[in-house]
Structure formats: C-alpha cells, structure tokens
Image: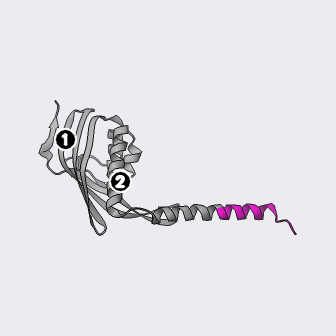
Amino acid sequence: MKKLPMWAVASLVAAVAILVIVAVNVVQILAKPGASEQMRLAVNEMKEATLTGKPGGFLEHMSRSLKLPPPYDAMVSNPHAELSRWIRQAEIERLEVTDVRPEVYGTSGVVHANVELVVSAPFTFSYNGPVEINFRKEVHKRLFVIPEEKWLVESFGPVDPSNFQYGF
C-alpha cells in the first residue's frame, strides 16, 4: 500500500476539522430557543453583564442601529461607546429585573419588564418601574459564512420617566 504524501494528510485533516467546526455551529444555530426565550435570555445576560461591569456581555445584544431614550439620543453620537463607558464606571447598588414578558411581532419584538435600579456613581439616581426593550431580528454571519438570526436591542427606555429619582 502506497503511503500518502504529508501535504495530502494535512489537507485531509484540515478539511475534516473545518467540516466538524461548521457542523457544530449549524447544530448550535438550529438548537436555538424560540424568539421569546432568546429575548428573555438576552435581558438576563445584559443584567448580569451590567452587574459585573463587563460591557462586552451587554453590548453583544445591542443592534448597530441602537437608539438611546430621550433626551440622551440627542446628546450621544455613539451609543455603543457611551453605554460601554457607563457600564465600566457605574457603581450599581441594585439591579432587579422582574416580570419579563416578551412579545413577538414578526421580525420585531418588545420585552415589558419591571426594573429596580439604584446607581451611586458616576451620578446618583434610581428608577423603579416598568421599562420597554425593543428588539429586532437581524441576520449575522457566524464563521463569516453561516447566516444566523439574532434578536438584538434596537431601543429601550422607561415607560414612565417620572419614576426616576435623582440624588438621595
């Protein structure tokens, strides 16, 4: 039996490895939960990332077309950078997200939730009340080739801004 050249063996091993990686990613995409559960998981992951001061875990759920709530939308030119800076600097004393209720409308969705937030720095404020987080289904490429649908936050804000309290 003739022995294969080293380049052929290496090529074969590389091809098999690439196929395995692609297959694993396709299976992960197909095994994703439904839209409502994806939004619920995103809200929980954003909460945990905020509490630990890790903006990457928060920003991975943000759409590139993210809009901040008024009046910040007019003051900030790069919402991702501003949120990242705020998450790193904020001293969050309390963040509770309860009664998470996702609603899906085709390629968009809204999560209604109650939030209790107490921040002591860089400025002191608290919020206790309902919020709306607007999601949009976007298609991204996993491994630069495999299309993957993700539910990303397009905008968010309090339902009743009068529930904010500044300085205590």
Within 10 angstroms of label 1, few (less than 14), some, or many (20 or more) residues?
A: many
Please give left or right for residue 98 compared with residue 84 in the image: left
Q: Residue at x 37, y 38 (%)?
A: 53
The amino acid type found where label 2 is placed reads: Leu
The answer to whether residue 144 is seen in the rendering is no
Q: CA distance from mark 1 to mark 2?
A: 22 Å
Q: Nearer the viewer, mark 1 or mark 2?
A: 2
Q: Residue at x 60, y 62 (%)?
A: 20
Which residue is labeled 1 in the image?
A: 127
Query: Of helix, strand and loop, which mostly describes the magenta segment?
Result: helix
Quadrant where the image shows the N terminus: bottom right
Residue 124 at x, y percent in the picture? 22, 33
Q: Which residues are magenta?
A: 1-16
Residue 121 at x, y percent in the picture? 27, 32
Quadrant where the image shows the C terminus: top left
Q: Which mark is residue 59?
A: none
Within 10 angstroms of label 2, few (less than 14), some, or many (20 or more) residues?
A: few
Q: Which mark is residue 41?
A: 2
Q: Residue furthest right?
A: 1
Q: Secondary structure at mark 1?
A: strand
Residue 11, magenta (yes or no)? yes
